[in-house]
Image (cartoon, helix red, strand yellow):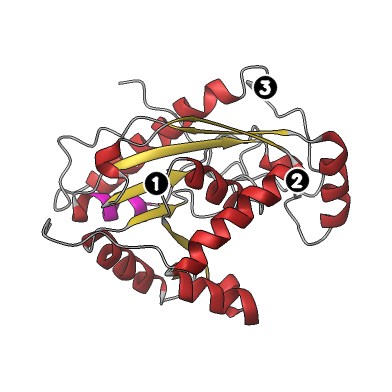
Amino acid sequence: MDTTHSPWRPPLIWRAAQLLARAVVALLARLEVTGDIPAALRDGPLILAANHISPFDPVVLAAACRARGVAPRIMATGGLFRAPLIGAAMRRAGHIRVDRGTAAVHRALDAAAAAVGSGSAILVYPEGRIGLDPGMWPERGKTGTARLALTCDAPVVPVAQWGSHEVLPYRAPRGMLRGLARSLTRRPVLRVHFGDPVDLGGLHPDTPGAARHATDRIIDALTDTLAPLRPDEPDRPRHVDPGRPVDLTRVHRRRTG
């Protein structure tokens, strides 16, 4: 990978949005950010791999990244880009559109590879969707994040979060007002932890099965990073969202060796 690039500079609109995210989170909840990103990695190239538990995740992660001095470009669902005002803001901020379930999804990986290659930090959800594991643990990931990391030789930092599912329900905007009212009253604790970079040593992009092995390592690291954030909820979350479906087909079996 070319290391002679100049670091990507986040546009003013994205830095302002991060400040707004911190204000919104402070209004609705109490944010606790732990861990850090090594100073040498903050300007990129860098991949931040986060678990996905709620529609409120992007707001929480934008605020947490602001607290750690990084403004990553986010790989976000194409639906956001199709919204009249939000879509224009997302494009101006430099975020990357992902049209899941379509033949055009490879364009997102190409755009992400170009972004990482030019020195950007990007934020991805390696699960590829809001997880539907019954215990709300990270589910088996898609291989896109791993392929991106191996191809670009970029470090991957796991970013675990817990609590955003108490702010917005899975089916938001359905139930959104009720969730926001509850948060204003109860002010749940939102915890975000930046873990140690994932060890992807010994894996090469042209080796068969490398992307799957790298994906499992990333999800293992996310699981390990998440566990301390929910010590009193080891099996099932206390807050149960009745509108959240369960899918057992992608339960992640952690590798022990």
Quadrant of the image containing the N terminus: bottom left
Tag 3: residue type?
A: Glu
Q: Position of residue 152 (x, y in %)?
A: 20, 55
Give me the residue at 20% from left, 62% from top: 6
Name the magenta segment's main secondary structure: helix
- The residue lying furthest to the top in this view is 232
Mark 1 residue type: Leu
Task: Please report contact status of discs 3 and 2: CB closer than 8 Å, yes or no.
Answer: no
Q: Say whether disc 2 or disc 1 marks the residue closer to the N-terminus.
A: 2
Tell me the crowding category of disc 3: few under 14, some 14 to 19, or many 20 or more residues within 10 angstroms, Cα based: few
Residue bearing mark 1:
48
Is 74 located above or below residue 106 in the figure?
Answer: above
Tags 2 and 1 touching, CB below 8 Å: no
Which residues are the magenta region? 143-149
Residue 108, image quadrant = bottom left
* Of labels 3 and 2, the one closer to you: 2
Give how far apart the Cα atoms at labels 3 and 2 are: 25 Å
Mark 2 is on which residue type?
Leu
Mark 2 or mark 1: which is in front? 2
- For label 2, the residue is 27
Query: Where 175 sits versus 42, above or below?
Result: below
